[in-house]
Image (cartoon, rainbow, N blue to C red):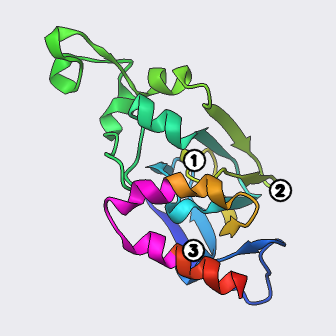
Amino acid sequence: SYGLQLGLDLPGIEAPANTFRIDKDFSYGLQLMHRGFLTKTHKDQAGVMPLIVQVRGDSLFLVWSLEDGLKAGLTGGGGAAETPESEWEHEWLPPEEGGEEGGEPRPGAWRRFASMPSAAMVLLKGGDLALLRPGAWHRVFSLTSKVALYWNYHDLLTLAEGLPSCALERASSGELPARLLKAICAEAD
């Protein structure tokens, strides 16, 4: 399954008021995905707030909070252990495939997703806009071929909400929090 995601630097498009970018790695982009494409479980790095504009096509977003994902064991890297894709294929995981010790089965990913207080399924159609909370875990199913634009930025009003996401990443890379701090200081000047 193939999809194309391009990072863009569009100087004519400004970020929303009270926001700032870290650098080109976390700025604007274009997604071209065919029907059936799956964007696996992940959260956007450095505590950014992703803004998605679905230009054309339909996508189904599964979204849940950073905290709920860690508690339920539904994560996609970014400083946390990655949930194997096979867990999304089972209603219950047998002991030989990651179930609990003592022979008890463990709920598969869909059951764990449905049990989380923050779990949401969002259908985006052409012309829709979505804003994800900083650190939100998500996976995206392209129901039709799609074109989407995205912006990854920090909002000065919700910056503190993104810090737990940065703290989680610190274990795997001390570079991201340093880049974030540098960007905050540059914005304050």
Residue 100 appears in which quarter of the rendering? top left
Viewport quadrant of the C terminus? bottom right
Q: Which residue is mark 1?
A: 136
Helix, strand or loop at mark 2? loop
* Mark positioned earlier in the residue sequence (3 or 2): 3
Depicted 73 relative to depicted 80: above or below: above
Whether residue 150 is visible to the viewer of this picture, yes or no, is no
Q: Which residue is mark 3?
A: 26
Which residue occupies 52% across, 43% down? 66
Q: CA distance from mark 1 to mark 3?
A: 16 Å
Front position in the image: 103 or 176: 176
Q: Residue at x 41, y 53 (%)?
A: 168
Numbered mark located on residue 127 in the image:
2
Image location of residue 140, percent across then percent down: 56, 47
Of the two numbered discs 3 and 2 in the rendering, the one whose residue sits closer to the viewer: 3
Q: Which mark is residue 79?
A: none
Marks 3/2: CA distance?
Answer: 23 Å
Q: Nearer the viewer, residue 71 or 130?
A: 71
Q: Is residue 65 left or right of residue 2?
A: right
Q: Residue at x 65, y 77 (%)?
A: 21
Q: Quadrant of the N terminus?
A: bottom left
Q: Position of residue 143 (x, y in %)?
A: 62, 44
x%, y% of residue 37? 50, 51
Instruction: Tell me, yes or no, whether the two marked residues, 3 and 2, touch with CB atoms within 8 Å.
Output: no
> What amino acid is labelled 2 in the image?
Gly
Question: Which amino acid type corresponds to the residue marked 3 in the rendered image?
Answer: Phe
Q: Residue at x 55, y 25 (%)?
A: 116
- Magenta span has 4? no
What's drawn in magenta, residue-wise?
A: 165-179
Specify which label sits upstream in the sequence, 1 or 3: 3
Instruction: Indicate left or right for 185 with 88 as reference.
Output: right
Q: Earlier in the sequence, mark 2 or mark 1?
A: 2
